[in-house]
Amino acid sequence: MTPNSRTGVGRRSLATLISGALAAGGLAAAGVTTLEPGAASASSHREAPLISGTPQYDNTDLYAFVSPDKPDTTTIIANWIPFEEPAGGPNFFTFAEDAQYDLRIDKNGDAQEDLVFRYTFKTHTKNDKTFLYNTGPVESLDDPDLNITQTYDLEMIKLRHLKAESRTKIADDVPVAPSNVGKASMPDYDKLRKEAIHELAGGVTTFAGQADDPFFLDLRVFDLLYGGNLSEVGNDTLKGYNVNSIALQVPTSHITESHEQPVVGIWSTTQRKNAKGHFKQVSRLGNPLVNEVVNPVKDKDTFNASTPRDDAQFLKNVTNPELPKLIEGIYKIPAPKEPRNDLVDVFLKGVKDLNQPPHVTPSEMLRLNTSIEPTDKPKRLGVLDGDNAGFPNGRRLTDDVIDAALQVVEGELVGAKNDLGDAVDANDKKFGASFPYLANPTEGSRGPLAEGVKSGNDVRSQLGDALRPAAAEGSGNTTLIAASAGAGAGGILLIGLALAWWRRMRGRAY
């Protein structure tokens, strides 16, 4: 294996990676997992000081690709709320009601949005006299046992020179797929997911709800770049976490300027209502890793509140990036010479003759050439590995943007061939073959028996038969039954947790 090999670091064993990194002259291996996301976290997971405290408004990732099963359409996926712990009840994960969640599209490369798809959400509670998210098994989105639900409206806004020419509500009161509480609460979550997919007029399809976080990477970069010696690599940090997703599939002709100009720029934003009742932008995401790796702390909040047309203020962060210098300081891999005009093309213009629109105004957004047909066998490194349907030409769910971005930052496009990466090459869950393509969220009741517990009998002995029904043998022992009365049509809710210390307490005096 040499630094110029195109096989990619993820195909080498971790032992080889680390031993090569520690060996004199082992440049390729040393860089491998040095710094994938760089200086903040997963693509936009807790990437800026202000937004990290308000996760409901925090964009985590943006994806845009020509739909593999419907190549005349384009799919856009945007995620919010990082690090959703599946068992994080009783208040599970909802979109904010005082926010506008936007997908913005620039049709002509002038750094101004020409089209906005805006999602706004409402929360509904059936019974506010219980603490439960659901009061029984949920079999459909309109199941009376699903206590907390959300719906959304979808508005399409057409703009000219940043002024709205028309506003059309294309979806009204559409149900959101709920958080996946667990197998007992939602025995057939896939059915709920399918019910949340809605086909609209004009060939548009929409989805909103919880999903497995599709981003895969090792986030332990913050412990001095993987421990300072690559002793911490190869673990998918986001495995088992969920996000809230919005997915939109539209006929490509709806979002492009013309057949002759098929390149579109896409970014997502969140606007939050302030104390005066006005919506202000608090989060923004286009290309992955920009506000993490490219922007220093002093610029991160500014970037989240800014627009692509004002991105000249961040140019120096791109032409003189910090990440290669950090890698050189710790792993002795020489940083490419500055100014980094190659990064300007990737992050601010698009790659010439691939996804760079004519007369482009440099600005940060995800750029997609919609005329490039999807491939049956996508390569995880996308354009770097000869697959022009992948990143940085848009972003597919399977694209390994950490490895691709790291290799580009370390000079792949200016002759410094390398195989750098983080040794995490794929998501832990398989993606779907049809819209919305995302994997179902991990359920809150996931996992096998606790370590050391081998059977149901062992569980019973450890818990002292704590969960025996009250009417069963030994019911004369101490029992706790919790009851909650629901007003009106809610009726009476009984929660049975029979804590009968039958086996353990038998024979003792109370």
Image (cartoon, rainbow, N blue to C red):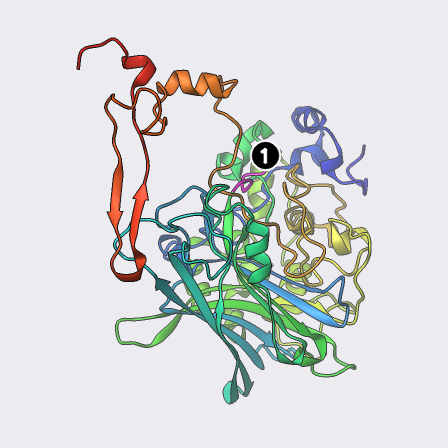
Residue at image location 18% in from the left, 11% down from the top: 509
Whether residue 288 is visible = no
Q: Is residue 228 above or below residue 431?
A: above
Whether residue 34 is visible = yes
Residue at image location 59% in from the left, 34% down from the top: 235
Q: Position of residue 138 (x, y in %)?
A: 47, 51
In reply to whether residue 237 is colored magenta, the answer given is yes
User: How many marks do you count on the picture?
Assistant: 1
**Quick one: quadrant of the C terminus?**
top left
Q: Position of residue 217 (x, y in %)?
A: 60, 42
In reply to whether residue 320 is colored magenta, the answer given is no
Left or right, residue 454 beside residue 7:
left
* Residue to which mark 1 is pinned: 235
**Quick one: quadrant of the N terminus?**
top right
Q: Is residue 509 above or below residue 394?
A: above
Task: State which region is magenta.
Answer: 236-240
Q: Along the line of sight, which residue is nearer the eye, 267 or 329? A: 267
Q: Amino acid at mark 1?
A: Asn
Q: Position of residue 297 (x, y in %)?
A: 42, 54
Q: Residue furthest top?
A: 507
Q: Position of residue 81 (x, y in %)?
A: 45, 54
Q: Quadrant of residue 98?
A: bottom left
Task: Give the secondary structure at mark 1.
Answer: loop
Q: Is residue 321 above or below residue 479?
A: below
Q: Is residue 70 above or below residue 423?
A: below
Left or right, residue 289 beside residue 27:
left
